Image (spheres, rainbow, N blue to C red):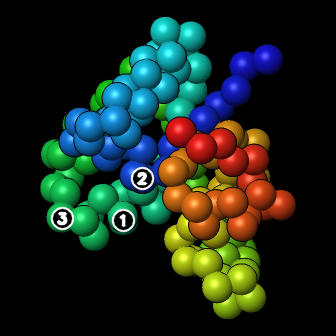
């Protein structure tokens, strides 16, 4: 069965910044995605997080261009998803952005890949795999 993936922002950056062991793991994962012609989704939340970390639009385009154009897709964030993330963040004491990533995965049937332990608390929302 073909899977579509959603990489947490840190995974994109592990690869782009060549962050030692994590960078190597991210490289292997992205290489597998490319070689198996699988798809990766990203959202405006990724773009916002990259910008908050000081990346320019050109750098962000470079990060996302790691995956072939036919293998990457942009997913929309809806107001209801933002509201659910805000409410759940208050209930669970987990960052709202992490919850929104999980909700996007659930609603778009995506496999979430992350190293962030907060996602362990969100397994009931999204299918999560540690990189």
Q: Quadrant of the N terminus?
A: top right
77 or 12: which is nearer to us? 12
The residue carrying pointer 2 sits among few (fewer than 14), some (14 to 19) or many (20 or more) residues within 10 Å by Cα, namely: many
Q: Quadrant of residue 87?
A: bottom right
The residue carrying pointer 3 sits among few (fewer than 14), some (14 to 19) or many (20 or more) residues within 10 Å by Cα, namely: few
Q: Residue 48, relative to residue 43: is it above or below?
A: below
Q: Disc 1 designates what residue?
A: 48
Q: Disc 3 designates what residue?
A: 54
Q: Residue 115, relative to residue 119: is it above or below?
A: above
What residue is at 20 percent from the left and 52 percent from the top?
57
Q: Quadrant of residue 63?
A: top left
Report if residue 63 is visible in the image.
Answer: no
Q: Residue furthest right?
A: 124
- Helix, strand or loop under label 1: helix
Q: Earlier in the sequence, mark 2 or mark 3?
A: 2
Expressed as whole percent of the image width and height from the top left, the position of residue 19 reads 26, 41
Expressed as whole percent of the image width and height from the top left, the position of residue 24 reads 34, 29
Expressed as whole percent of the image width and height from the top left, the position of residue 107 reads 75, 53
């Amino acid at each position: 069965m073909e899977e579509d993936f959603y990489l947490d922002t840190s995974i994109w950056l592990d690869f782009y910044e060549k962050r030692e062991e994590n960078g190597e793991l991210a490289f292997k994962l992205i290489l597998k995605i490319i070689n198996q012609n699988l798809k990766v989704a990203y959202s405006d939340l990724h773009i916002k997080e990259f910008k908050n970390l000081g990346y320019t639009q050109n750098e962000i385009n470079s990060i996302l261009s790691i995956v072939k154009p036919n293998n990457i897709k942009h997913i929309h964030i809806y107001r209801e998803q933002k509201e659910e993330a805000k409410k759940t963040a208050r209930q669970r004491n987990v960052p709202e952005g992490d919850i929104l990533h999980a909700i996007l995965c659930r609603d778009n049937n995506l496999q979430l890949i992350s190293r962030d332990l907060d996602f362990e608390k969100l397994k009931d929302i999204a299918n999560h795999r540690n990189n």
